[in-house]
Amino acid sequence: MGFVIVSFEWGGEYCSLKVDEETWRKITAGEETFLFSEAGYDGETFDMTWNFNFQKKGRLTVDYGIDGGCALDGEIKDLEISSG
């Protein structure tokens, strides 16, 4: 496994992030990790901040835009995960 792709549905579209194997191991071990991506929603593109293990092990928040809107506040286990 060289990487995983984690995804969730956001407004009828999928927001995805490619994570390398070493980083994914740290995340699954409970290390707080911040990663960044872009995603489209309602015809616009947003900068996304993925906050893994934020404030507690297993928690995930995904914030977007400069105003800090929240696209997801949930659990890592609820993501769709595929490996590559």
Image (cartoon, grey):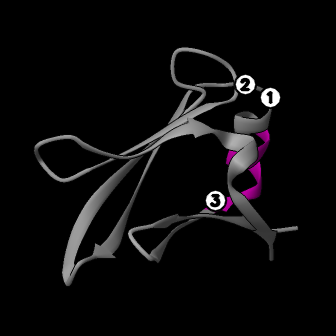
* Residue furthest bottom as drawn: 43
Q: Nearer the viewer, residue 46 or 71?
A: 71
Mark 3–mark 2 Cα distance, whole angstroms, equals: 15 Å
Mark 2 packing: few (<14 Cα in 10 Å), some, or many (20+)? some
* Residue furthest left as drawn: 67
Mark 3–mark 1 Cα distance, whole angstroms, equals: 14 Å
Q: Residue at x 23, y 65 (%)?
A: 46
Is residue 59 positioned above or below 18 on the image? above
Left or right: 50, with 48 as reference point: right
Mark 2–mark 1 Cα distance, whole angstroms, equals: 4 Å
Q: Residue at x 20, y 84 (%)?
A: 43
List the residue tagged with mark 3: 19
Q: Residue at x 68, y 59 (%)?
A: 20
- Residue 42 percent location from the top left of the image: 23, 78
Q: Reading the chain from its start, which is encountered first: label 3 or label 1?
A: 3
Q: Amino acid at mark 2?
A: Gly
Mark 3 packing: few (<14 Cα in 10 Å), some, or many (20+)? some
Q: Residue at x 38, y 69 (%)?
A: 11
- Residue 22 percent location from the top left of the image: 75, 48
Residue 66 counted in the magenta span: no
List the residue tagged with mark 1: 29
- Residue 25 percent location from the top left of the image: 79, 42
Left or right: 17, with 42 as reference point: right
List the residue tagged with mark 2: 30
* Residue furthest front as drawn: 12
